[in-house]
Image (cartoon, helix red, strand yellow):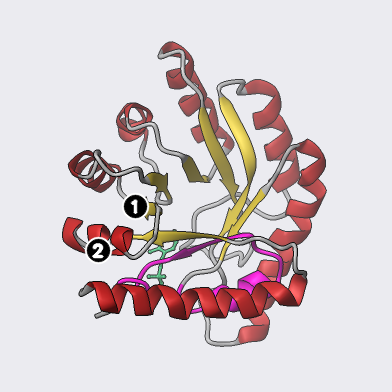
Amino acid sequence: MTKKQAIQNLDEIITKVEGARLYISHHHIVHIIAISKYSNITDINTLYNAGQRAFGENKVQDLKLKSEELEDLPLQWHFVGRLQSNKINNLIDLNPSLMHSLDSLDLAIQLNKKLSAKNKTMKCLLQINSANEQAKAGVSSSEAISIYEQISNICPNIKLLGVMSIGAHTKDNSVIKKSFKITKEIFDKLQANGAIYCSMGMSSDFELAIKSGSNMIRVGSSLFKE
Ligand SMILES: *Cc1c(COP(=O)(O)O)cnc(C)c1O
């Protein structure tokens, strides 16, 4: 990817984000996380030079390789994938800015225990399977509030800052919108418990996600396209 291409990709996304966020309000700010899982160090560096600062990976090993390789750059690293129990310590050692994919009470308890042993904390989002799809990770929308409160109460080393969802896997916009709406309603209720981030929207559906109230989007393919 050339720098010119990176700037163009970023410009296109920002223009679309601007259009969508004004649909909510002039004060609605949207964070853009560049998901670099299909990209290499060179392209991440190019996107950094085009102005992007926050990047995300879905595998602990890739997060380690890329963040260590680029440690001289002032980047924010996010983790957005399924966290296997045997990778928890590795993730903790990488100090991610935000972990988007806390997807069960059981994982929270294991993570909290290991954080506590290392005397560390981690900022996390609770992943909600609002599209109610078998293939997706996340807590069910009906249990989300109760699980969020339980994690807040019994996992002091986890700093819960909101929720994350992946939109329904379909081309039917009304179904995708419905899944975003479910997550947004849960997010609104959790703001009293300190939730500030609603992470929803990927390359194919981020405008719809923002119009549904998302304030953090995770875009990969459209930012790194050649
Ligand atoms: C890959 C991935 C993204 C980005 O997907 P694109 O369609 O490439 O924008 C966002 N969120 C998660 C959890 C991902 O795994």
Q: Is residue 221 magenta?
A: yes
Corner quadrant of residue 51: bottom left
Quick check: which quadrant has ligand 1? bottom left
User: At 36% from the left edge and 80% from the top edge, which residue is drawn?
Assistant: 8
Q: Amino acid at mark 2?
A: Thr
Please tell me whether mark 2 or mark 1 is closer to you in this view: 2
Q: Quadrant of the C terminus?
A: bottom left
Residue count near mark 2 (Cα–Cα under 10 Å), binned few <14, some 14–19, many ≥20: some
Q: Is residue 6 above or below residue 67?
A: below
Callout 2: SS: helix
Q: Is residue 38 above or below residue 159?
A: below
User: At 73% from the left edge and 52% from the top edge, which residue is drawn?
Assistant: 187
Callout 1: SS: strand
Q: Quadrant of the N terminus?
A: bottom left
User: At 71% from the left edge and 71% from the top edge, which residue is drawn?
Assistant: 212
- Of 137 and 90, nearer the camera is 90
Left or right: 117 in relation to 65: right
Left or right: 139 in relation to 54: right
Visible residue check, residue 222: no
Q: Is residue 214 magenta?
A: yes
Q: List the residue tagged with mark 2.
A: 46
Residue 79 in the image, given as x and y percentages of width and height: 41, 46
Visible residue check, residue 121: yes
Q: Amino acid at mark 1?
A: Glu
Query: CA separation, marks 2 and 1?
Result: 17 Å
Residue count near mark 1 (Cα–Cα under 10 Å), binned few <14, some 14–19, many ≥20: many
Looking at mark 2, is its residue's CB closer than 8 Å to ligand 1?
no
Q: List the residue tagged with mark 1.
A: 57
Magenta span covers which residues?
203-224
Residue 149 in the image, given as x and y percentages of width and height: 73, 34
> How many dots with numbers?
2
